[in-house]
């Protein structure tokens, strides 16, 4: 019931914005006719296009950010991710001992995290470390 009311309010707000936009358009056309030039109308339409493009960009950015936030599939993977945040230099056996699971499980979960773009291996397998990829880096495609 509350969502119905919210949708009504949003619809009214949208209708109000559209009517105000029509009023502005009409006023601009009157100004253009009085000044005997289309410049005020062109400026108004240009500003309107800029506003619309900015709205579209914001919607696009939000959708891209939502795509980059990947849910962690299970508790073991979440605990492994948290363990990497605390100490990113452990090996498979050490992560396994820390979480109470086998090395094979750790390897599979690390592969999931890598595939999701949440971590990346830096350096060699022997002396390297795991780096957690920030949301900003994922947005920029820094580690792809």
Image: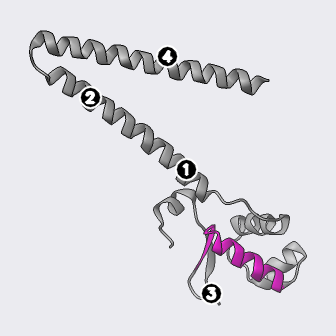
Crowdedness near tag 2: few (<14), some (14–19) or many (≥20) residues, C-alpha within 10 Å: some
| Cβ–Cβ under 8 Å for marks 3 and 1 | no
Which disc, if any, is residue 63? 1
Q: Is mark 1 on a helix, strand or loop?
A: helix
Which disc, if any, is residue 16? 4
What separation in Å lies between label 3 and label 1 (alpha carbons)?
A: 38 Å
Q: What element carries label 3?
A: loop
Which disc, if any, is residue 78? none
Between 2 and 114, the one nearer to me in the picture: 2
State which tag comes first along the sequence, 4 or 1.
4
State which tag comes first along the sequence, 2 or 4.
4
Q: Mark 2 points at which residue?
A: 45
State which tag comes first along the sequence, 3 or 1.
1
What separation in Å lies between label 3 and label 4 (alpha carbons)?
A: 62 Å
Between 17 and 108, the one nearer to me in the picture: 17
Residue 30 is left or right of residue 103, and the answer is left
Q: Between label 3 and label 4, give the one nearer the viewer.
A: 4
Q: Between label 4 and label 1, give the one nearer the viewer.
A: 4
Q: Give the range drawn in magenta.
A: 103-121
In the image, residue 25 sits, relative to residue 112, either above or below, namely: above
What separation in Å lies between label 2 and label 4 (alpha carbons)?
A: 19 Å
Q: Position of residue 34 (x, y in %)?
A: 13, 9
Between 6 and 118, the one nearer to me in the picture: 6
| Cβ–Cβ under 8 Å for marks 2 and 3 | no
Crowdedness near tag 1: few (<14), some (14–19) or many (≥20) residues, C-alpha within 10 Å: few
């Amino acid at each position: 019931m509350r969502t119905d009311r919210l949708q009504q309010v949003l619809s009214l707000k949208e209708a109000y914005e559209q009517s105000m936009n029509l009023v502005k358009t009409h006023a601009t056309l009157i100004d253009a006719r009085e000044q005997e030039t289309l410049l005020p109308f062109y400026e108004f339409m240009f500003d309107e296009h800029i506003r619309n493009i900015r709205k579209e960009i914001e919607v696009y950015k939000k959708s891209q950010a939502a795509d980059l936030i990947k849910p962690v599939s299970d508790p073991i993977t979440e605990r492994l991710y948290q363990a990497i945040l605390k100490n990113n230099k452990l090996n498979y056996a050490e992560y396994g001992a820390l979480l109470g699971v086998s090395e094979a499980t750790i390897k599979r979960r690390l592969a999931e995290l890598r595939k999701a773009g949440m971590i990346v291996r830096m350096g060699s397998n022997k002396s390297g470390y795991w780096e957690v990829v920030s949301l900003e880096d994922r947005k920029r495609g820094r580690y792809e």
